[in-house]
């Protein structure tokens, strides 16, 4: 995002922390507000997708049928 004007396109915006583990993996800490908005539980999986505009999209993955929740 390049400025305040770009922020108006999005309804939910939070800063999250990324930390590196000892084995070189990365963890993202979501704020409770984001988890509630996306209906995320502690056992859920998220998938990160890149759209044709180069934007990163995060969706909740339903493992029972390997589909994305809309």
Image (cartoon, rainbow, N blue to C red):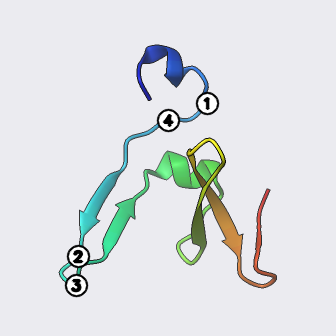
Residue count near mark 4 (Cα–Cα under 10 Å), binned few <14, some 14–19, many ≥20: few
How far is the residue under mark 4 from the one under mark 1? 7 Å
Q: Mark 3 and mark 2 in contact (Cβ < 8 Å)? A: yes
Work out whether residue 35 or residue 46 is closer to the camera in this orientation and state it: 46
> Which label number is shown at residue 44?
none
Tell me the residue that label 2 is attached to.
21
Where residue 67 appears, as percent x and y from the top left, is: 78, 73
Work out whether residue 57 or residue 51 is closer to the camera in this orientation and state it: 51
Q: Quadrant of residue 14?
A: top left
> Which label number is shown at residue 23?
3
How far is the residue under mark 3 from the one under mark 1? 35 Å
Q: Mark 1 and mark 4 in contact (Cβ < 8 Å)? A: yes
How far is the residue under mark 4 from the one under mark 2? 25 Å
Residue drawn 30% across the image and 58% down it: 18
Q: Mark 4 and mark 3 in contact (Cβ < 8 Å)? A: no
Q: Counting residues from the N terminus, which is met first, the one under dot 3 or under dot 4?
A: 4
Q: Mark 2 and mark 1 in contact (Cβ < 8 Å)? A: no
Residue count near mark 2 (Cα–Cα under 10 Å), binned few <14, some 14–19, many ≥20: few
In the displayed structure image, the side of residue 7 where residue 27 appears, left or right: left
**In this view, the mark in front (3 or 4):** 3
Q: Counting residues from the N terminus, which is met first, the one under dot 1 or under dot 2?
A: 1
Tell me the residue that label 1 is attached to.
11
Tell me the residue that label 4 is attached to.
13
């Amino acid at each position: 995002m390049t400025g305040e004007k770009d922020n108006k396109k999005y309804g939910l915006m939070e800063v999250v922390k990324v930390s590196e583990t000892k084995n070189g993996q990365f963890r993202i800490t979501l704020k409770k507000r984001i988890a509630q908005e996306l209906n995320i539980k502690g056992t859920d999986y998220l998938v990160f997708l890149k759209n044709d505009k180069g934007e990163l999209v995060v969706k909740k993955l339903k493992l029972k049928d390997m589909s994305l929740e809309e």
